[in-house]
Image (cartoon, rainbow, N blue to C red):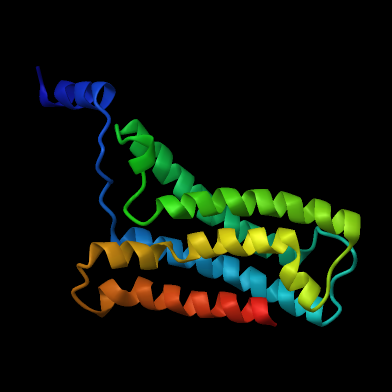
Amino acid sequence: MTTLERQVAFATTEKRKTYPPGSIRFDLWMCLFSGWFLLGLYLDGWAHNHGRVDDTFFTPWHAVLYSGYLAVALRLMFSYARNTFKGYDWMHALPVGYMAALFGVVIFGFGGGFDMVWHQTFGFEENTEALLSPSHLLLALGAFLYVTAPLRAAWIRKSARGWRDLLPVVLTLTYLICLFTELAL
């Protein structure tokens, strides 16, 4: 039996209960896409605060926000599918710290659909109402879970050797502050 045949046999008969290796590169891609999402979040907040939004859900600001979310979701789902096909167990198919991010993507996706229905039914909230609307709370929870994934991954890995390895941590903490301050505005 060749090495390739053994690898295929292993992948098809025995699911791996370990996690695929994480990397700084993967963390940086997630930081890039999370930054794109947060840019959309700030643009949307700016548009609402400056009267640039009529009573429709489909705005250029939402397009930036949701395309950033889509980039995060596609990156996670692609990695999840690839690692599942490699033989990793479905609960261990993403690097350490990233399964919660996948759940966050699902929560945010559900919250986005709920948000669209909410706005079409009740209109757009202002001030504290916007912060406490059920759809926005779901969106905030989902975003928190996937934006903070590089921080969780680095925390669990504990193998940082320099600033290059800590860049995703610094970016994630910055994004977390941005997320909380945008929600408070």
Image quadrant containing the C terminus: bottom right
Position in image of residue 109 (x %, y %): 63, 50
Q: Residue at x 17, y 21 (%)?
A: 5
Furthest residue in direction top, as rendered:
1
Q: Residue at x 41, y 50 (%)?
A: 99
Q: Residue at x 21, y 78 (%)?
A: 162
Position in image of residue 130 (x %, y %): 77, 71
Decide which of 176, 47 is in the foreground and name it. 176
Q: Is residue 47 left or right of residue 143?
A: right
Position in image of residue 65 (x %, y %): 65, 64
Q: Is residue 165 left or right of residue 108?
A: left
Q: Place residue 56 in its image quadrant.
A: bottom right
Image quadrant containing the N terminus: top left
Q: Is residue 86 left or right of residue 40?
A: left
Q: Is residue 183 left or right of residue 151?
A: right
Q: Place residue 138 in its image quadrant.
A: bottom right
Q: How many marks?
A: 0
Decide which of 32, 184 is in the foreground and name it. 184
Decide which of 131, 120 is in the foreground and name it. 131
Q: Residue at x 30, y 75 (%)?
A: 166
Position in image of residue 147 (x %, y %): 49, 65
Furthest residue in direction left, as rendered:
1
Residue 45 higher or lower than 101, as above or below? below
